[in-house]
Image (spheres, rainbow, N blue to C red):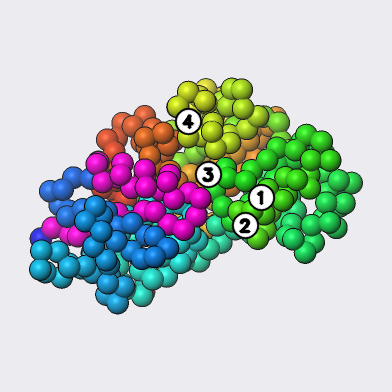
Amino acid sequence: MKKNVAVVCGGYTAEREISLGSGDVVIRNLDESPFNVFKVVIDPDGWFVEPEHIPVDMADFSFLWTGNVVKFDLVFNAIHGSPGEDGKLQGYLDMMGVPYTNCGVATSALTFNKFWTKQVLDNHQIPMAKGRLVNKQNAEAMEQEISSQFQLPLFVKPNNNGSSFGVSKVKDMRELSKAISEALKYDREALVEEGISGREVTCGVYRHEGNIKVLPICEVVTGKHDFFDYTAKYTAGESDEIIPAPIPETEAIKVRNYSTAIYEALNCRGVVRIDYIIANGVPHFLEVNTVPGLSEASIVPKMAKTAGMTLNEFFTGLLDGASCDH
């Protein structure tokens, strides 16, 4: 019997539009022979099966379809940001006993917090830039500490957000306060990190038939942009994403080894994307994305294609590995 798959997208954050694009790509590339595929959009005012705009019954994760109650068997999670990347959706699905394609509650909640992810990985000897956590209450004191102890440039970003919203590169300490304020528009906390000069690469990791697999590494060349900001990331022609990355094999081995170690240390599931800056031959961890973009402009689908997979094969493999904690 065909399984009913909910491709869940949308969400409550600034990443909503990116998520909708990811959901559409997944739906277009899932084979409907083994699956009945439905698009479920999460909005602040409810969950709906689109395009018919049929409400989802949250009591048992079902909906009415042509007079019959349809219950979902699997979830392909394509929500970037809350509630799909921070553990909230996963907690609900665990209670419903419905398997999903990405990390569980604990891992999702941890990795959504960039600062605490760095704290955990620091115990695993993963190289990374030093950073400080700033909020509205301690901003003035932290600005003074950072100004005296950190070297320019600095990167300031929301601690619990993605897709480069609210991210600034600070080249003058007089710009720090403004950059922190911009980041705090998107989250209650800001992460300030000392900039590392080097080549930016990103690595996709997933589990297939119980084994951790590493996708081809991508180098991100931002061209006229100072860093991989929102425009560079999602506007065609604003950055070059070179797959496989033209880096020395010694560096590539380190990226693959660190990525596998991070995937295991954080107890990840499904596909994640891990970002680095390579400086002096050493990859420095930036962040991990547990629901990476899957839109036409996103990196992970390009990695999968470079690895010789169709998106149908790749997405079906993720569904085959779906699980939940219950």
How many angstroms separate mark 1 from mark 2 (CA)? 7 Å
Nearer-the-camera pick, 75 or 83: 83
Ranked by sequence position, the earlier of labels 2 and 4 is 2
- Find disc 4 in the rendering and name its residue: 235
> Which dot, 1 or 3, sits closer to the camera?
1
Name the residue beneath numbered marker 1: 183
Could you give the CA–CA distance between mark 3 and mark 2, rounded to whole angstroms? 13 Å
In this view of the protein, can residue 103 be seen by the observer? no
Q: Is residue 206 above or below residue 280?
A: below
The earlier-in-sequence mark between 1 and 4 is 1
Question: Residue at (65%, 40%) from the top-left corner?
Answer: 284
Give the CA distance from mark 1 to mark 4. Answer: 21 Å
Q: Amino acid at mark 2?
A: Asp
The residue under label 2 is: 187
Q: Which residue is mark 3?
A: 163
Do residues under tags 1 and 2 come within 8 Å of each other at their CB atoms?
yes
User: Please, is residue 197 above or below residue 179 in the view?
Assistant: above
Whether tag 4 and tag 3 are in contact, CB under 8 A, the answer is no
Nearest-to-viewer mark from 4 and 3? 4
Residue 132 lies, in percent from the top left, at: 75, 53
Q: Are marks 3 and 2 in contact (CB under 8 Å)?
A: no
**Quadrant in which the C terminus is drawn:** bottom left
Q: What element does badge 4 sit on?
A: loop
| Range covered by the magenta-colored residues | 2-29
